[in-house]
Amino acid sequence: MNRKDEIAAALTAVKSKIPQESVLIVVTKTFPKSDVEILYQLGERNFGENRSEEAAPKSDSLPQDCIWHFQGQIQSKKIADIVSWADYIHSLDEISHAEKISRAASELGKIQKVFLQVNLDSDPANRGGVLPSGLIELAKSISKLPAIEIVGVMGIAPLNEDPAPAFSRLQECSHKLREIAPNARYISAGMSGDFEIALQFEATHIRIGSSILGARTPKP
């Protein structure tokens, strides 16, 4: 089986479990541009990346109707680079980063769409994200900035735990956010191991890598 057939079979298997109205983001981080090109040929348009230095050349070389999602940890010094290629940023959790995103987007004449990352871990030190108790305050501060639009919340379930309680908390956060930002209706949740559970809690954007592209080799 060649690489295209391999990806096509895995993609078909995953998509059979995802409602048509859900957005599948294929996480292409660490995988070569050739895999993204195959995915494009197979009809996929949403791609997820964690590093700007890897994503920027991919986005430059793929057709312009691709939609690029940054989902890694935000580094202040990389924000202008991220905004230059990312259609969506999934991991915003600080007002200082939001201010820099707003400035960078303004300079490019674009509105940067962002998800607010919510920390779903029982031990908040284990993961990035704003605590659920601080979400609304952060959202209110960000909503005052130009050139940035909150589209929803993002969360990652804790490792080695039942993900359902975490996704339930994220769903609650989404509903509270919509009270002050009615258009922030998206929920970015669910990866290869838990996306079917995330879908039970209104996830709209599913981020899947290994189930489609296979095991990845971590970069140093």
Image: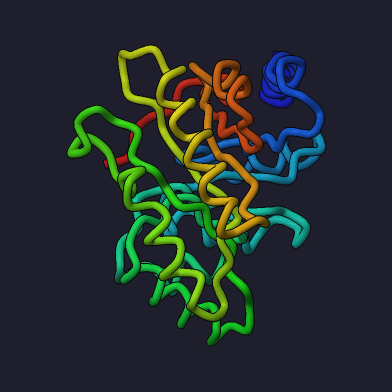
Does 105 sit above or below residue 43?
A: below
Does 68 sit above or below residue 94?
A: above
Question: In the image, what residue occupies the spot 29% across and 30% down?
Answer: 121
Q: Nearer the viewer, residue 172 or 39?
A: 172
Left or right position of 95 against 10: left
Left or right position of 127 against 12: left
Left or right position of 185 against 79: right
Q: Position of residue 180 (x, y in %)?
A: 56, 59
Image quarter in which the N terminus is found: top right
Q: Residue furthest bottom?
A: 107
Count of numbered badges drawn on the protein:
0
Q: Position of residue 189 (x, y in %)?
A: 53, 33
Image quarter in which the C terminus is found: top left
Does 203 sit above or below residue 79?
A: above
Q: Position of residue 63 (x, y in %)?
A: 75, 58
Q: Position of residue 162 (x, y in %)?
A: 39, 12
Does 144 sit above or below residue 87?
A: below
Q: Quadrant of residue 113?
A: bottom right
Colour pattern: rainbow
Question: In the image, what residue occupies the spot 18% across and 39% down?
Answer: 125
Question: In the image, what residue occupies the spot 75% across and 39% down?
Answer: 44
